[in-house]
Image (cartoon, grey):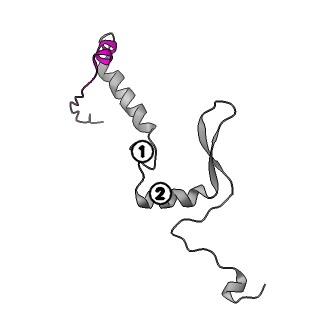
Amino acid sequence: MAQQKQSIVTFKAEDSLVAALQGMPNRSAFIRSAVLAALDSTCPLCGGTGILTREQKDHWDAFALDHAVKECDTCHEWHLVCGRQQTRHPHQPRRRSQRQRGQKK
């Protein structure tokens, strides 16, 4: 398998971080691993910015109608809890009842 081309990435760091990295046997591998882990943990909606676009907020508001953010009793981390089995997509029109469609039951 062909080896992927690698690029050099630099970043500014506080003196305390630089000092902590000095003792690492393979700083590049450690930093690569830390960056990949951080990217894997970013918010799927905002991508880690902490800000939703207007459209993302509309989707979130529709989702939040049937979901809640609650603290886990075991690990005390916050997580999403579903309140229903199915939810309506924010761009999907509301379902009409049989009476509204003019059909008999």
Q: CA distance from mark 1 to mark 2?
A: 12 Å
Disc 2 is placed on an element classified as helix
Give whichever of 24, 75 is nearer the camera: 75
Residue bearing mark 2: 57
Q: Earlier in the sequence, mark 1 or mark 2?
A: 1
Residue placed at 59% from the left, 38% from the top? 78
Q: Residues within 10 Å of mark 2 (few under 14, many from 20)?
A: some
Q: Is residue 5 positioned above or below 97 on the image?
A: above
Measured from the top left, where is residue 9 in percent x and y? 23, 31
Q: Point out which mark residue 50 bears.
A: 1
> Residue 85 occupies which quadrant of the picture?
bottom right
Give whichever of 32, 57 is nearer the camera: 57
Measured from the top left, where is residue 77 in percent x and y? 60, 34
15 in magenta: yes
Of the 4 image quadrants, the one containing the N terminus is: top left
Chain part drawn in magenta: 1-21
Would residue 47 be found to the left or right of residue 2 on screen?
A: right
Amino acid at dot 1:
Gly
Q: Point out which mark residue 85 bears.
A: none
